[in-house]
Image (cartoon, rainbow, N blue to C red):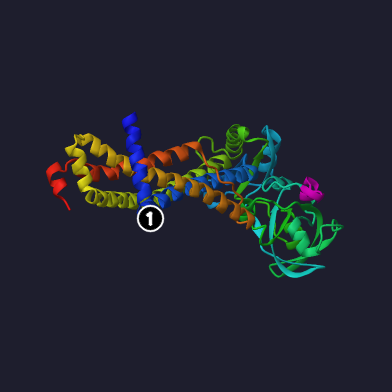
Amino acid sequence: MAQFMEYVKMALQNLRSNKGRSLLTMLGIIIGISSVIMIISIGNGVKGSISADLNKMSSGQIGVSVDETKKKDNAFYFNQVDMDTIENNVSHVKGVTPGSNYRFWPTVTSPKATNQEAMLYVGTEAFQYAYPQPIMKGAYFTKEDVDSGAPVCVLTEMGARTLFGTTDNIIGMPIEINLWGMTADLTVVGIEKDSESSTMNMMTGANQTIMIQSPYTMMSTLFGWEMDEFDSFFIFSEAPEYSKTISTSVVKILEARYDVRGEGFFIINNSDDSLGQILDILSYITIFIVFVASISLLVGGIGVMNIMLVSVTERTQEIGIRKALGAKTNAIMTQFLAEAAMITLVGGIIGIFLGVLGAFGICSLLTSLKVLECSAKVTFSTVLIASVFSSAVGIFFGIYPAKKAARLSPIEALRHE
């Protein structure tokens, strides 16, 4: 142990005596380690943020559609009776609404705005669970509104401010929408609080356009489009753990209603499965970027090997004197390996510090710019692996120079000028 500490002491002394050269040698290691730490920490933070947002937004949602290859007579559609049957006969179902393709892009006119582009979502009263945000003023439209085709709507907080300049005293106020060249009025019955999730805003477009939610039957009342058939619909469960049992019950009910038992006619898309796939993709992307960043470690390792070879050449006489005084081959080799490992270890520690600092800095910047809400997640295992890996790089690339130093003949080394 004492001998090992002596090697470490000598390695540190050599680093201090060649500060500039040592720092330049470490640079590749520093860049590589800091990049890996930063990418992994930011990646973990982004995954955690997206996972939380998607869980809040879509966890427990079940999409139901028909396998296109198995449609009979090239025509098959669901209807309100199907949705009512499921909602009334399957346990732990909060609501059912037509598929997500029922959205339109009208222009909107109000007391404070003219011909503003908007995004209109239509569905049943259960659509409130699709992008769940609390209602801050008024109330969400009801089943009675859906049954009667009432011309009502719910706005987001930002949409209300854009159209009226305020969120106060606008419940019951009309907005004029223009769709397909036809104009109609919708009455505001509720204002939904803006989402603080950048992921949700990006997926819904709520941060870029006026978002309006209305009963799907309103399309018939105002625009003459009878929306009585759907190619898909969404089921909202009370909790994610009920999704599988709900899916099984739904398939049984639909197969019985349409007499297609055992034919695999219906496709069930569980949002929790989709969420897992998204997170897996993010993990693969992170791994790939880490792999690319690790190339700089290879470059840094080659730099370590190069500088150690130079060090061997510069210290040839020193090696010769040590061997002449009885130093063993293993001792010479261990000394140079210790120096190589020390260079990469110190570089690794600096890289870890800069990587952690950079990860928190970038996540703070993304959050402050409202690009993406994330918090860097630095784990002990990541830091430990980075430290061990940086030392391993030094040892690996230091083997050849160390062997070269250890194999020098004492006589030839002493003759070296």
Splitting the image into 4 quarters, where does residue 338 fall?
top left
- Tell me which segment is drawn in magenta: 135-146
Q: Position of residue 163 (x, y in %)?
A: 78, 64
262 left or right, relative to 59: left
Q: Is residue 263 above or below residue 211?
A: above
Q: Quadrant of the N terminus?
A: top left
Q: Position of residue 178 (x, y in %)?
A: 73, 67
Left or right for 402, reference 109? left
Residue 71 seen in this snapshot: no
Task: Indicate the quadrant where residue 201 lies.
Answer: bottom right
- Give the image location of residue 162, x and y in percent: 76, 64
Q: What's under tag 1, amino acid-wise?
A: Gly
Hey, which quadrant is residue 181 in on the image? bottom right
Question: How many neighbours does mark 1 have within 10 angstroms: few (below 14), some (14-19), or many (20 or more)?
Answer: few
Residue 28 magenta: no
Q: Is label 1 in a helix, a strand or a loop? A: helix
Q: Which residue is mark 1?
A: 20
